[in-house]
């Protein structure tokens, strides 16, 4: 019996009628291409006549080279397969869209178009849309510091927290900006200072500013500023808001502190209007107390309430 099965198997292998494995297709019809992209007849042939992929006439009918079609599909973003396969995979490997660059920099699209208009970055046209080669973007990015990616903005925020601007130095010393520049240019004092450039603006490190204060007797901190309070603030966003407020008012005590927030600070942190903070306070959402002649919000209660509110929103 085994011999018989072996003979049958041998005959099957040698038979000219044996079913051969299907060869991989290299060409497809125009209707097949149109169906794959969800195109009507006119749009199918319009795309063929654009010569974006290889096509030729076989047996009296136009055929499309599948490899050429797939290469084209991977380098365009206008057309989408009905199968859901993402287009432009190769294109996205070497270039950004204008929106992608805008999102990277945290700016509006129009600003990116302005940069392109000024030839600060190279652009190529793909399906009537501008694309920015990644190499061109990186070359431009590393040669400027005004525009920053989200990651670098976070790093910058840490650097900003460790530095002060020239106007802030003037505020801290109770003097004018021109006097600050005179100090910085004076060989007697200039060796104290270290600078960091952030977003194309020169800033003074707090450490070097402190060395300056300790290394000479002429200039001292203006007692009307909150420098030490700001230096202790761990919330970088709030610290920057307070610095700006202080530079505008020049009034000591115009800011909150580690334990208390002003209504403006609470409004800024919650990203709502001050009137909304007043409504929440009236409803007893957090404790409001009077500190001297000023009304303040208990910071720990406000932050706890905000955290609980955000948690409830996320669960809705």
Image: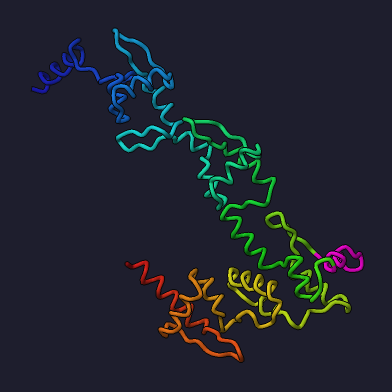
Q: Judge left or right: residue 9 versus residue 41.
A: left
Occupied quadrant, residue 62:
top left
Residue 28, compared with residue 152, is above or below; it is: above
Q: Residue 18 placed where, x, y %?
A: 19, 15
The N terminus sits in image quarter? top left
Residue at image location 58% in from the left, 52% down from the top = 149
Residue 195, compared with residue 274, is above or below; it is: above
Q: Main secondary structure of the magenta part?
A: helix
Residue 92, compared with residue 215, is above or below; it is: above
Residue at image location 56% in from the left, 86% down from the top = 295
Q: Judge left or right: residue 100 versus residue 30.
A: right
Residue 41, compared with residue 267, is above or below; it is: above
Start and end of the magenta stretch?
179-193
Magenta residue check for 34? no
Residue at image location 65% in from the left, 73% down from the top = 245
Q: Residue 34 placed where, x, y %?
A: 30, 25
Q: Nearer the viewer, residue 90 or 298?
A: 298
Occupied quadrant, residue 6:
top left
Q: Residue 297 placed where, x, y %?
A: 52, 83
The residue most toward the top is 59
Q: Which of 105 and 134 is in front in this view?
A: 105
Q: Which colour scheme is used?
A: rainbow
Q: Judge left or right: residue 108 versus residue 216.
A: left
Residue at image location 56% in from the left, 51% down from the top = 107
The C terminus sits in image quarter? bottom left
Q: Judge left or right: residue 80 versus residue 14.
A: right
């Amino acid at each position: 019996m085994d011999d018989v099965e072996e003979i049958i198997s041998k005959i099957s292998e040698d038979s000219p009628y044996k079913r051969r494995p299907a060869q991989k297709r290299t060409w497809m019809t125009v209707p097949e291409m149109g169906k794959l992209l969800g195109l009507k007849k006119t749009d199918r042939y319009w795309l063929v006549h654009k010569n974006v992929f290889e096509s030729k006439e076989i047996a009296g009918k136009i055929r499309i080279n599948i490899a050429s079609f797939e290469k084209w599909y991977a380098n365009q973003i206008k057309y989408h397969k009905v199968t859901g396969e993402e287009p432009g995979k190769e294109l996205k490997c070497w270039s950004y869209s204008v929106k992608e660059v805008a999102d990277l920099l945290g700016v509006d699209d129009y600003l990116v178009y302005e940069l392109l208009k000024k030839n600060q970055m190279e652009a190529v046209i793909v399906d009537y849309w501008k694309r920015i080669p990644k190499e061109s973007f990186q070359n431009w990015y590393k040669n400027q510091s005004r525009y920053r990616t989200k990651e670098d903005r976070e790093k910058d925020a840490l650097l900003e927290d460790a530095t002060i601007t020239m106007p802030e130095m003037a505020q801290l010393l109770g003097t004018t900006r021109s006097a600050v520049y005179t100090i910085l240019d004076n060989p007697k004092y200039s060796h104290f200072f270290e600078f960091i450039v952030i977003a194309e603006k020169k800033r003074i490190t707090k450490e070097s500013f402190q060395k300056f204060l300790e290394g000479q007797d002429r200039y001292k901190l203006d007692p009307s500023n909150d420098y030490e309070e700001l230096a202790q603030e761990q919330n970088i966003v709030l610290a920057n808001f307070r610095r700006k407020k202080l530079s505008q008012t020049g009034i000591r005590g115009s800011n909150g502190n580690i334990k208390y927030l002003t209504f403006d600070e609470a409004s800024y942190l919650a990203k709502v209007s001050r009137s909304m903070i007043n409504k929440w306070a009236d409803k007893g959402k957090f404790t409001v107390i009077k500190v001297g002649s000023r009304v303040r919000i208990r910071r720990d209660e406000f932050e706890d309430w905000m955290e609980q509110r955000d948690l409830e929103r996320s669960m809705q």
